[in-house]
């Protein structure tokens, strides 16, 4: 399984370059602007912007991933501690449908496999958040990223850091 696609919706042709929604003239102008912002930030002792990208561009795979994880972890953080049978069923259905429509094909296929092996634990807020944290860590590890400490998932997504 490859994990290096650059853009959402381009899985069938991974060699295709990034869709930028930027023509050359605009790109050149943005590059000049970035260099000038960088100089100005260095002068003021501030951090240079890490990337200059038109915020109105379509999301790439990583932006989509990061924002989606934010939504999913926050949803899990506010799931009831004592869910009703209907809420449990709805949450299972949500992840089933989500895994079929997530608009990064390779990510969706992989997530579908993972949730078949480890279905969502919908018994409580804590169990759902822990399950989702584990799912996110499976992706982190596949991408060569550090695992997150799932004992702190509520600090990250609900209550704020203790220290
Ligand atoms: P992200 O991994 O997006 O994390 C965002 C924030 O969540 C982090 O800053 C951190 O504070 C917090 N966090 C990190 N780990 C955890 C955790 N375990 N529990 C709770 N909080 C945590 N990309 C691929 O290239 N291939 C894939 O197959 C793939 N599959 C994906 C499947 C799903 C369902 C989703 C939502 C995304 C997937 N992605 C995949 C995208 C990938 O996971 C990242 O979102 C992307 O690489 C951007 O990473 P990031 O460094 O911004 O942080």
Image (spheres, rainbow, N blue to C red):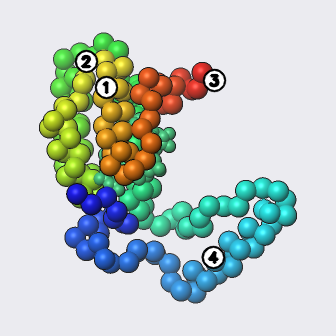
Q: Position of residue 65 (x, y in %)?
A: 39, 51
Classify 10 Å Cα crowding around label 4: few (below 14), some (14-19), many (20 and above): some
Q: Quadrant of residue 19?
A: bottom left
Classify 10 Å Cα crowding around label 2: few (below 14), some (14-19), many (20 and above): some
Q: Is residue 56 above or below residue 74?
A: below
Q: Position of residue 55 (x, y in %)?
A: 54, 63
* Front: mark 4 or 3: 3
* Label 2, label 1: how far apart the Cα atoms are: 7 Å
Task: Indicate the secondary structure of the residue bearing disc 4.
Answer: helix
First along the sequence among labels 3 and 1: 1
Specify whether residue 68 is in view: no
First along the sequence among labels 4 and 1: 4
Q: Position of residue 83 (x, y in %)?
A: 28, 16
Q: Which label number is shown at residue 163?
A: 3
Disc 4 residue: CB within 8 Å of ligand 1? no
* Label 3, label 2: how far apart the Cα atoms are: 29 Å
Q: Name the residue rendered at 71%, 61% in the picture.
A: 48
Q: Is residue 76 above or below residue 12?
A: above
* Front: mark 3 or 1: 3
**Residue that sits furthest to the top in the current view:** 82
* Label 4, label 2: how far apart the Cα atoms are: 49 Å
Specify whether residue 58 is in view: yes
Q: Position of residue 87 (x, y in %)?
A: 24, 23
Task: Indicate the secondary structure of the residue bearing disc 3.
Answer: loop
Q: Are marks 2 and 1 in contact (CB under 8 Å)?
A: yes
* Label 4, label 3: how far apart the Cα atoms are: 39 Å
First along the sequence among labels 2 and 1: 2
Q: Which label number is shown at residue 30?
A: 4
Q: Which residue is mark 2?
A: 123
Q: Quadrant of residue 131?
A: top left
**Residue that sits furthest to the right in the current view:** 43
Q: Which label number is shown at residue 128?
A: 1
């Amino acid at each position: 399984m490859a994990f290096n696609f650059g853009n959402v919706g381009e899985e069938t042709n991974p060699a295709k370059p990034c869709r930028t929604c930027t023509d050359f003239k605009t790109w050149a102008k943005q590059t000049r602007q970035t260099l000038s912002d960088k100089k100005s930030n260095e002068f003021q002792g501030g951090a240079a912007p890490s990337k200059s990208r038109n915020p109105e561009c379509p999301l790439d795979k990583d932006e989509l991933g990061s924002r989606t994880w934010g939504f999913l972890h926050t949803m899990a953080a506010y799931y009831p501690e004592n869910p009703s049978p209907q809420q449990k069923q709805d949450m299972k259905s949500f992840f089933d449908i989500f895994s079929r429509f997530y608009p990064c094909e390779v990510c969706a296929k992989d997530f579908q496999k993972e949730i078949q092996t480890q279905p969502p634990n919908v018994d409580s807020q804590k169990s759902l958040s822990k399950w989702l944290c584990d799912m996110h860590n499976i992706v982190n590890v596949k991408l060569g990223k550090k695992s997150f400490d799932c004992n702190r998932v509520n600090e990250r997504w609900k209550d704020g850091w203790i220290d």
